[in-house]
C-alpha cells in the first residue's frame, strides 16, 4: 500500500526522506518519488521500481533543501509508471502533493478543472488534488501571470471540501516554501517530533529511526508545519459550514514499538495482520460500490462492457487455489440470486479440456496477484475463442488486468503473507456485489432483494470485528488439535467452498494433511478415515442446509470422531453436539462464507504458529506463481 513521508527541519531533507521510504518498503509498492523545495524552486524526481533506484537518481543531483515530501506508490488508478508515481504537481509546478487513499469523485472534478484549462498528465485520481488546490490558491493563474495570489492552508481546506473519498496528504507549495501542509481523512497520518525537525508519515515505521514522539492526526484534521511550529485545525465544521480555523491541542504520544513490530503493525506475522485487516478490507472493497439506499452495486470497472454483460448466457470463473475457492462461493451466489449459469474451472485445466465458449460466454479470472500463469493462460484461451474476458484482481496494472476486457479491483493494498487471507474476503465481497450487478442487469433480481443484500454487506465490517473477540477460544482449539495428523473440513452449499478453503489454509501453514468435502460426500468415502479423536471441522451456520449438516455431524459422532463447529451465535443445539464451537454472527446465507472463513484462517494460523513454522513464508510456496 502507498506510503507517505515528509520532512521539515535543520537537516538535508532528501536522505531523511529516502530513509523513511525505505522503512515503508515492507508495505509493498511499485514506484517512488520525492519533491524537495528551496529558494530556487522545487525539484521532483520519480522512478518505477525500488527506492534504491530513486536513491541512485538523487545521488546524481545535489539539492540543498530542508523541506520535502516523498511517496511509495502501490497502483490503484493507472499502471505503475513515472508519470503516475507521486508527487503529483500542477502545470505551473506550484503545488506538489503526495496522497494515500482514493478520491471517488476524481473524474467529475477532473472534467471541471479541464474546462478551466488545467492539463492532466497522469491516469491517477491523486493528480486532481494538486490541480484543485492550485485552482483554489490561484484561480486565474495564466502562463504570463506567475505571482503568488493565495493562501496555502486556506486553499488546501477549500479544495478538500470538494473531495469525496479518503486521503492522507502531504503538500508543499513553491510560492510558500517554508511549510508543509498535511491532512487526513480515512487514511492514517502522523507527525513525528524530533530534535529541531518534524517528520510527517503515513506509518510510524517511517519516523521510528529519528523519533518516538508523535502526534496522530484524526479524520478531518489539517496540520500546517512551519519551522518548529505545528498548527492543527479542523477542515470541516460540525455543521458542514466553514470550520473556525481554531488550533486543536494535540497530545504527544510515545511509540513503544521497534521497527520490526511496527512494520507488522504490532502483529507477530503479516498473516495475522492481514487476517485482522478484514473490516477495512470490506470497507475498501465496497467503497463507492455498495449503495444500499439505491439498491445499487456500482462496479465502475464493468461499465464499459455493460452492454455485452447484458447478453451473456453463461459465466465461467477461472482461478487457482484460494481465489478459486472464492470463485466457488460466487458460483452459488450468482446462480441462486442473479439467475445466470456459472461454472468454476481450475485455471490450470481450462485450456487443456477444449472449453466450449462463445461470445455469449464471459470468462472471469480471479487473482490476487494478477500474475498467476495458469489463470493468465486461461484468459488468453478464452480470448482466442471470442469470449468476453473479465477480472477480479488486486494488483493494478498486472498482466491479467492488461489481458482482460474489463474488471474490478479489490483495492485492499498488497498482501504480503504468502497464504492468501484478506484477498479471499475481498474476492467474495466483490462477487456479492457482482451478483447484485448481474442480477439487476439481467432483470432477475428485484430492487428489494438487491437492497437486502447490500444492507447486509454494509453491516459486515462490524460483524467481522466481533469474530476477533473469540480469538482466545480459537487459540485454545489450535493448541488442543495441533498434534493431529489429519483433518476433515465439511460444509454444504455456500460453505462447501469454505470447507475447501479451511483445509487448504491448514495444509499450507501447518503442513497437516487436510481435506475439504461437501458434507453430503462424506459418506461416499472420506468417512472411512474417521476414528476416535480424528478432528472434523463442520461449517454449520443456521442456513437452508443446517439440518443436513447436523446429520453429517451425527455420523462422525457415532464413530467417536472429534467435532469442531463454526456455528451461528445462539445455536444451542450445536453446543451439545460439538466438542468445540466457534460462533459467528448471523447474516444472510450467501454472506456466511465471509464470516466463516475468518475463524478458519485464524485456526490455521495458530496451529502453524503453535508448531513453530514460518507462517508468512510456508515451505515450497511462492506468493505469485508465474510458472505453469
Ligand atoms: C492460498 C494461496 C494460493 C493462491 C493461488 C492464486 O493461500 O495463496 O492458493 O490463492 O496461487 O493466486 P492469485 O490469487 O495471485 O492468482
Image (cartoon, rainbow, N blue to C red):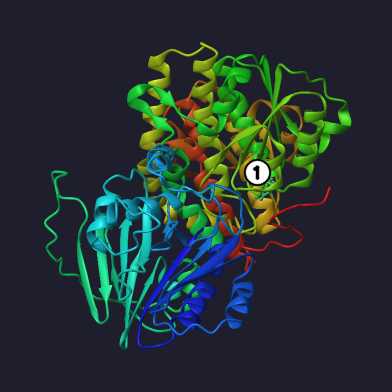
| Left or right for 598, reference 50 | left
Q: Is residue 200 left or right of residue 227?
A: right
Pick whichever, 576 or 95, lies toward us: 95
Towards the viewer: 20 or 79? 79
478 relative position to 89: left or right? right
Camera-nearest residue between 481 and 254: 254
Number of numbered callouts drawn? 1
Most extreme residue toward the front is 144
Rendered location of residue 264, percent (x, y): 49, 67
Label 1 sits on a secondary structure element that is helix
Relative image position of residue 525 (x, y in whole percent): 76, 32
Q: Residue 430 versus residue 65: which sits nearer the camera?
A: 65
Q: Is residue 68 visible?
A: yes
In this picture, residue 11 sits left or right of residue 490: left
Place of residue 495 in the rendered image (x, y in percent of width and height, measured from the top left): 57, 32
Q: Residue at x 30, y 70 (%)?
A: 176
Q: Give the residue at x 54% y 59%.
A: 85
Q: Which residue is mark 1?
A: 322
The answer to whether 393 is drawn above or below residue 521 in the figure is below
Which residue is depicted at the point 56% across and 59% down? 271
Q: Quadrant of residue 202?
A: bottom left
Crowding at mark 1 (Cα within 10 Å: few <14, some 14-19, many 20+)? many
Whether the residue carrying mark 1 lies under 8 Å from ligand 1 is answered with: yes
- Work out whether residue 337 can be spotted: no
Please report the residue visible at 32 percent of the width from the left and 88 percent of the height from the top.
Answer: 195
Amino acid at each position: 500500500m502507498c506510503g507517505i513521508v515528509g520532512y521539515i527541519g535543520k537537516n538535508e531533507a532528501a536522505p531523511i526522506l529516502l530513509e523513511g521510504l525505505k522503512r515503508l518498503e515492507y508495505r509493498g509498492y511499485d514506484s517512488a518519488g520525492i519533491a524537495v523545495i528551496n529558494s530556487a524552486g522545487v525539484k521532483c524526481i520519480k522512478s518505477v521500481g525500488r527506492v534504491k533506484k530513486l536513491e541512485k537518481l538523487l545521488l546524481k543531483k545535489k539539492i540543498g533543501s530542508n523541506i520535502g515530501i516523498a511517496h511509495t506508490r502501490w497502483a490503484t488508478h493507472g499502471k505503475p509508471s513515472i508519470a503516475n508515481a507521486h508527487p503529483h504537481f500542477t502545470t505551473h509546478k506550484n503545488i506538489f502533493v503526495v496522497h494515500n487513499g482514493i478520491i471517488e469523485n476524481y473524474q467529475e472534478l477532473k472534467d471541471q478543472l479541464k474546462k478551466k484549462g488545467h492539463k492532466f498528465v497522469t491516469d491517477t485520481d491523486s493528480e486532481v488534488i494538486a490541480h484543485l488546490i492550485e485552482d483554489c490558491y490561484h484561480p486565474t493563474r495564466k502562463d504570463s501571470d506567475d505571482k503568488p495570489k493565495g493562501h496555502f492552508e486556506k486553499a488546501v481546506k477549500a479544495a478538500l471540501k470538494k473531495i469525496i473519498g479518503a486521503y492522507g496528504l502531504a503538500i508543499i507549495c513553491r510560492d510558500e516554501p517554508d511549510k508543509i501542509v498535511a491532512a487526513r481523512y480515512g487514511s492514517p497520518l502522523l507527525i513525528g517530533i524530533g530534535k529541531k525537525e518534524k517528520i510527517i508519515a503515513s506509518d510510524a515505521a517511517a519516523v521510528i529511526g529519528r523519533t518516538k514522539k508523535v502526534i496522530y492526526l484524526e479524520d478531518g484534521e489539517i496540520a500546517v508545519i512551519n519551522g518548529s511550529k505545528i498548527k492543527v485545525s479542523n477542515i470541516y465544521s460540525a455543521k458542514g459550514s466553514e470550520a473556525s480555523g481554531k488550533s486543536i491541542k494535540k497530545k504527544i504520544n510515545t511509540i513503544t514499538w521497534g521497527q520490526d513490530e511496527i512494520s507488522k503493525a504490532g502483529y507477530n506475522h503479516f498473516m495475522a495482520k492481514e487476517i485482522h485487516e478484514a473490516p477495512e478490507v470490506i470497507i475498501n472493497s465496497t467503497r463507492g460500490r455498495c449503495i444500499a439506499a439505491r439498491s445499487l452495486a456500482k462496479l465502475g470497472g464493468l461499465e464499459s462492457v455493460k452492454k455485452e454483460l447484458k447478453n451473456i448466457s453463461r459465466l465461467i470463473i477461472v482461478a487457482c487455489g484460494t481465489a478459486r475457492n472464492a470463485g466457488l462461493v460466487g458460483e452459488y451466489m450468482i446462480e441462486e440470486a442473479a439467475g445466470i449459469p456459472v461454472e468454476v474451472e481450475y485455471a490450470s485445466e481450462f485450456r487443456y479440456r477444449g472449453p466450449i465458449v462463445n461470445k455469449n460466454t464471459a470468462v472471469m479470472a480471479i487473482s490476487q496477484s494478477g500474475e498467476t500463469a495458469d489463470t493468465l493462460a486461461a484468459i488468453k484461451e478464452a480470448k482466442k475463442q471470442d469470449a468476453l474476458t473479465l477480472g477480479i484482481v488486486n494488483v493494478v496494472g498486472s498482466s491479467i488486468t492488461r489481458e482482460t476486457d474489463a474488471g474490478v479491483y479489490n483495492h485492499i493494498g498488497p498482501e504480503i503473507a504468502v497464504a492468501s487471507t484478506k484477498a479471499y474476503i475481498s474476492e467474495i465481497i466483490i462477487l456479492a456485489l457482482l451478483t447484485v450487478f448481474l442480477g439487476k442487469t439481467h432483470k432477475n433480481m428485484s430492487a428489494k432483494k438487491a437492497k437486502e443484500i447490500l444492507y447486509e454487506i454494509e453491516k459486515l465490517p462490524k460483524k467481522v470485528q466481533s469474530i476477533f473477540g473469540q480469538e482466545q477460544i480459537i487459540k485454545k482449539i489450535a493448541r488442543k488439535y495441533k498434534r493431529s495428523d489429519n483433518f476433515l473440513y465439511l460444509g454444504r452449499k455456500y460453505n462447501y467452498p469454505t470447507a475447501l478453503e479451511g483445509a487448504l489454509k491448514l495444509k499450507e501453514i501447518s503442513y497437516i494433511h487436510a481435506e475439504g468435502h461437501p458434507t453430503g460426500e462424506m459418506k461416499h468415502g472420506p468417512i472411512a478415515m474417521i476414528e476416535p479423536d480424528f478432528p472434523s471441522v463442520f461449517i454449520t451456520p443456521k442456513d437452508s442446509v443446517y439440518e443436513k449438516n447436523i446429520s453429517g455431524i451425527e455420523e462422525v459422532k457415532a464413530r467417536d470422531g472429534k467435532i469442531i463447529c463454526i456455528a451461528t451465535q445462539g445455536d444451542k443445539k450445536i453446543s451439545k453436539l460439538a466438542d468445540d464451537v466457534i460462533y459467528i454472527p448471523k447474516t444472510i446465507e450467501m454472506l456466511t462464507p465471509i464470516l466463516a472463513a475468518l475463524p478458519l484462517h485464524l485456526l490455521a494460523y495458530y496451529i502453524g504458529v503453535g508448531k513453530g513454522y514460518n507462517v508468512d513464508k510456508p515451505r515450497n510456496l511462492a506468493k505469485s506463481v508465474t510458472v505453469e
